[in-house]
Amino acid sequence: MTSFLFDPAPTVSLPIVGDARRFPVRRILCVGQNYAAHAREMGSDPERQAPFFFSKPGDALVGDGADPAYPSATSNLHHEVELVVAIGPDGQGGVAIAGWAVGVDLTRRDLQAEAKSKGRPWDAAKGFDQSAPCGALTAGNLPDPSGAIVLTVNGETKQSSTLADMIWNPAEIVEQAGTLWTLMPGDLIFTGTPEGVGPLVAGDRVEASIAGLQTLTFTVRP
């Protein structure tokens, strides 16, 4: 039996709609600027170039209705609602899309802007603790590939678009990610956010929804 210097952290996981089993999370990959209007609002060219990726650690996940805390070292925390793709085994030794969820990529926008200006990595801006709230997974096919994707803050709509506005669709994103990493069961891919990203403060109530998937709600804790 293997012994450890200290007890390993528990496996991070997500609930699955209609299934008592849970989805164990290995890591989180994220796609940047995958909606043309969002690319423009961030000052980039929305032409269909190869998608670029960044990552969050698996333990950045916030699931089961938990409320993330407002992070340290920022005064400009932003919300970004996203369709999340869950990777599972395909039954033949490979991987395939196993399910879907609503996620929110929380971003320290001020730290990201500083990193961009100096040509530095975004890790502290994107991969911090509790930076990846995510709802329960829906297994099988995506209920509505062109469905609405919406985020509200305290009941006011801040982001509203459709999945059809993606520059790269989920299958293409998975294919592209597979050229950069060996995808494994347990990987989550956040597929980008539409326009309307904006700030959150402690006490804000966030509701994120995608047609056919379980709605994600949380309150930003102080």
Image: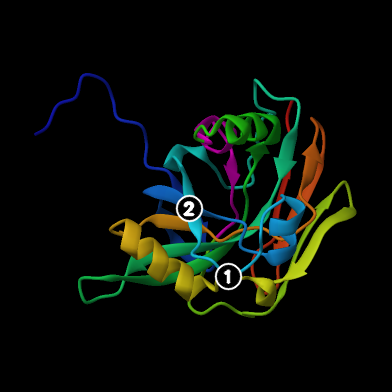
| Colouring | rainbow
Instruction: Give the amino acid type for the residue marked by disc 2 in the picture.
Output: Phe
Picture layout, residue 75 above or below residue 103: above
Instruction: Give the amino acid type for the residue marked by disc 1 in the picture.
Output: Arg
Indicate whether residue 104 is drawn in magenta. Answer: no
- Locate residue 142 relative to residue 183 in the image: left or right: right
Dot 1, how many residues are within 10 Å of its Cα: few (below 14), some (14-19), or many (20+)? few
Q: At which x and y percent is residue 149?
A: 72, 66
Tell which residue pokes out farthest to the left in this image.
1
Helix, strand, or loop for circle 1?
loop
Q: At which x and y percent is residue 17?
A: 54, 66
Pointer 1 residue: 48
- Residue at (42, 43) in percent of width and height: 12
Pointer 2 residue: 53
Comparing 75 with 203, the one in front is 75
Picture layout, residue 50 above or below residue 212: above
Helix, strand, or loop for circle 2?
strand
Magenta range: 122-136
